[in-house]
């Protein structure tokens, strides 16, 4: 029995988190000795995101490793629209095998990619707005702790400069990022809290709004520790008024006292629509939590498109096994039958298939590390994401 109300690795691998109708379907088909070879594709025919940063494939691969299936997928960290230039839904994943070998995994497969891709896509939108201004994923306290590494991993792939979770840092192979909590000032007082933070941190950030007015606390912190890296505001909404004007006031007072080097970081309820004005007001770094962690999911669906060599699917879907061609110059997408692997784009560029095989007969044949995935994502945000 699990200590917490959550599924563990074994529960997921043993299909205990599937929807019950898959369990019933498997029993019916086994009773009839029916187990056809099928091809299933995962698409997102509708979404709120102009571009999807596809994320979560790592867990799908772990789930299907050792199963007698072939898996093709868009690489993680790839940004693309949900439909091609002709309006055909893009297959992000294709799975081939006997239906009963993977039928019950549909629920966790979709769960792995729907939420992760939503978080990563929202994070990429923030990255596009902020450019080189860093932001840290602060949102794991707003969601179930069991999924905190997924939240941080997805936000990091999407463009976050760092993550706050200790376990997340271990999994990603990076040092977690954090400043100081209000609790430190409440227990020690601002002066002692700032002093111990200053003396024991490589990256010195002072939280200044526990007790004092933000402007006067900022002046005090900068006067006492003139080479502090950042002062951070986590001002609650009930005290904010016009937050951007508070930032402008602080920036003016710091500059007036020759503290141009002391930068301003803000956190607490920050959403993407808040960013342009806060940047203009003088914010140099952000801690963004709830809006990233609770980003709208991408509603992927998984459908049979071929049964025993016959192209067939349900109403509203496109039957047949497909490839996804993308132009190396204009990045247009073209969904085509799987017999087509390349063509010349109307812009003159070369369109190549970006669906890549990751599992062959149950064996993982490609394994990517987090830096490769994130680099792919960051480069594409700069090249193709046009909000």
Image (spheres, rainbow, N blue to C red):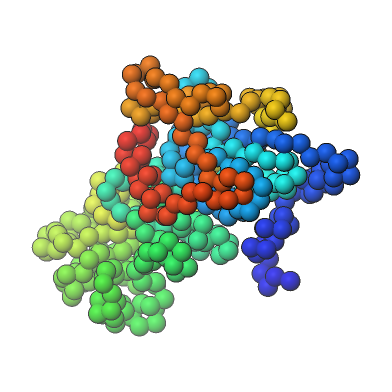
Q: Nearer the viewer, residue 286 or 325?
A: 325
Residue 379 x/y as whole percent: 33, 42
Q: Which of 266 and 328 is in front in this view?
A: 328
Q: Which of 60 and 132 is in front in this view?
A: 60
Residue 25 x/y as whole percent: 81, 43
Q: Which of 137 and 76 is in front in this view?
A: 76
Residue 327 x/y as whole percent: 39, 27
Regarding residue 324, the answer to whether it shows in the image is yes
The quadrant of the image that shows the N terminus is: bottom right
On screen, 180 above or below 137?
below
On screen, 227 above or below 124?
below
Left or right of 214, for residue 101 = right
Left or right of 308, for residue 205 = left
Question: From this viewpoint, which residue is outermost toward the right?
Answer: 31
Q: Residue at x 61, y 42 (%)?
A: 70
> On the image, which quarter does residue 15 sit in?
bottom right
Left or right of 261, for residue 11 = right
Regarding residue 117, the answer to whether it shows in the image is no
Residue 186 x/y as whole percent: 39, 78
The quadrant of the image that shows the C terminus is: top left
Q: Residue at x 11, y 64 (%)?
A: 257
């Amino acid at each position: 029995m699990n200590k917490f109300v959550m599924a563990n690795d074994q529960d997921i691998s043993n299909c205990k988190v599937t929807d019950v109708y898959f369990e019933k379907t498997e029993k019916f088909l086994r009773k009839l000795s029916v187990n056809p070879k099928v091809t299933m594709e995962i698409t997102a025919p509708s979404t709120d995101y102009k571009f999807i940063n596809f994320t979560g494939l790592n867990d799908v691969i772990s789930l299907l490793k050792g199963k007698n299936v072939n898996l093709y997928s868009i690489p993680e960290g790839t940004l693309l629209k949900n439909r091609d230039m002709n309006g055909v839904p893009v297959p992000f994943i294709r799975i081939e095998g006997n239906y009963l070998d993977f039928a019950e995994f549909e629920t966790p497969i979709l769960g792995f990619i729907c939420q992760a891709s939503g978080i990563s896509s929202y994070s990429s939108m923030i990255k596009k707005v902020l450019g080189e201004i860093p932001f840290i994923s602060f949102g794991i306290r707003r969601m179930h702790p069991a999924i905190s590494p997924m939240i941080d991993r997805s936000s990091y792939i999407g463009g976050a400069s760092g993550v706050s979770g200790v376990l997340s840092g271990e999994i990603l192979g990076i040092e977690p990022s954090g400043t100081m909590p209000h609790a430190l000032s409440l227990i020690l007082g601002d002066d002692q809290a700032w002093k111990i933070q200053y003396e024991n941190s490589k990256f010195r950030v002072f939280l200044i709004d526990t007790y004092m007015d933000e402007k006067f606390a900022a002046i005090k912190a900068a006067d006492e520790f003139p080479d502090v890296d950042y002062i951070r505001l986590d001002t609650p909404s009930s005290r904010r008024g016009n937050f951007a004007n508070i930032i402008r006031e602080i920036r003016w007072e710091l500059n007036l006292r020759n503290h141009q080097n002391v930068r301003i970081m803000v956190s607490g309820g920050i959403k993407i629509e808040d960013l342009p004005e806060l940047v203009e007001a003088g914010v140099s770094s952000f801690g963004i939590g709830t809006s990233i962690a609770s980003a709208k999911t991408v509603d992927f669906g998984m459908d049979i498109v071929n049964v025993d060599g016959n192209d067939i699917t349900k109403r509203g879907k496109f039957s047949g096994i497909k490839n996804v061609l993308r132009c190396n110059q204009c990045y247009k997408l073209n969904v085509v039958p799987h017999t087509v692997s390349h063509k010349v784009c109307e812009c003159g560029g070369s369109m190549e298939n970006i669906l890549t095989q990751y599992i062959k007969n149950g064996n993982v044949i490609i394994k990517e590390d987090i830096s490769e995935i994130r680099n792919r994502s960051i480069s594409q945000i700069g090249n193709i994401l046009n909000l």
